[in-house]
Image: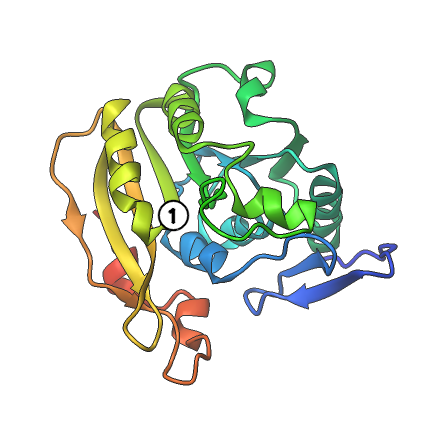
Amino acid sequence: MMKKKLSLTASERIDDLQFEGLKVIQDKNLYAFTSDAVVLANFLKIKKGENAVEIGSGSGVISILATKKTNAKEIVGFEIQKPLFEMANKSLALNDIKNVKFVCDDIKNYKKYLSDGTVDVVFSNPPYKKEGTSTKNLNESKALARHEKTLPLDVLINVSSKMLKFGGRAYFVYDADRSAEMITALVKVGLEPKRMFFTENGKGKVILFVVEAVKGGKSGVKVLPNLVTNDLDGKYISEIKNGVWASHNAAQ
């Protein structure tokens, strides 16, 4: 991989993703990715020749990991926050990645960039805290990434369904407490859940809901075992980080 010299701001740093030499730039003043992103990147499946769209790409970490973890032909990531969009583009240059493109725009304007029914895969680690349900971060960038002010659940699911081809797949990671809302929203627009699981920390607390849904798919979902992401000391389990969890990442 060709390395490129980039000019970083005083608050930016380069983090090693510890996978295939990939790196990502993060800014201490902006939203930083968490284990949610890694879990989704490991579960995500994009077949050879398929195109994909990421909704809310943030620092670009999931799309960047997907270039090595899947066989995507092209990934387009939509990010509404310009500072995150610019930083993600720096990470593309740093890794010399050619098959990912980031767009700085509200996902509701997607028709300016692509047509309905033309996307093979949609994936997102969206903001999943309802407005007013938890303490809001005073940092605007972090608040937008965590609270659904600019990306409500119904908008996320409706746009995803419209973009996808018949038989296309959608992948989401969401707050476990809102899993029933997510499933209801998916089924309402013809996105049938096919695989799903919950994550839990090392102390038995369920944290996240992760789902794969197929547009126009038949009813019937495979519920996978809970995925434990941390040990008893709270440390992130290396097997999860490296994607070694065959029962969750197995073929349908």
Q: Is residue 241 above or below residue 100?
A: below
For label 1, the residue is: 174
Depicted 135 relative to depicted 239: above or below? above
Image coordinates for residue 215, horizontal then vertical, percent? 28, 27
Residue at image location 37% in from the left, 70% down from the top: 229
Name the foreground residue: 186 vs 61.
186
- Residue at screen point 61% across, 47% down: 143
Q: At 87% from the left edge and 61% from the top edge, which residue is drawn?
A: 10
Q: Based on the displayed image, in which of its 4 quarters is residue 161 positioned?
A: top left
* In this picture, residue 252 sits left or right of residue 109: left
x then y, percent, for residue 166:
29, 21
Q: What coloring was used for the rendering?
A: rainbow
Q: Secondary structure at mark 1?
A: strand
Residue 163: x and y in percent read 43, 22
Q: Quadrant of residue 149?
A: top right
Residue 45 visible? The answer is no
- In the displayed image of the protein, which residue is found farthest to the left? 220
Residue 144 seen by the camera? yes
Residues 148 and 119: in front is 148
- Picture quadrant where residue 184 is located: top left
Left or right of residue 161, residue 22 in this image? right
Which of the pair 198/215 is nearer the observer?
Answer: 198
Label 1 is placed on what type of residue? Answer: Tyr
Q: Quadrant of the N terminus?
A: bottom right
Q: Measuring from the top left, give residue 159's x and y in whole percent.
A: 43, 23
Q: Which residue: 38% across, 23% down?
A: 158
Q: Residues within 10 Å of mark 1 (few under 14, many from 20)?
A: many
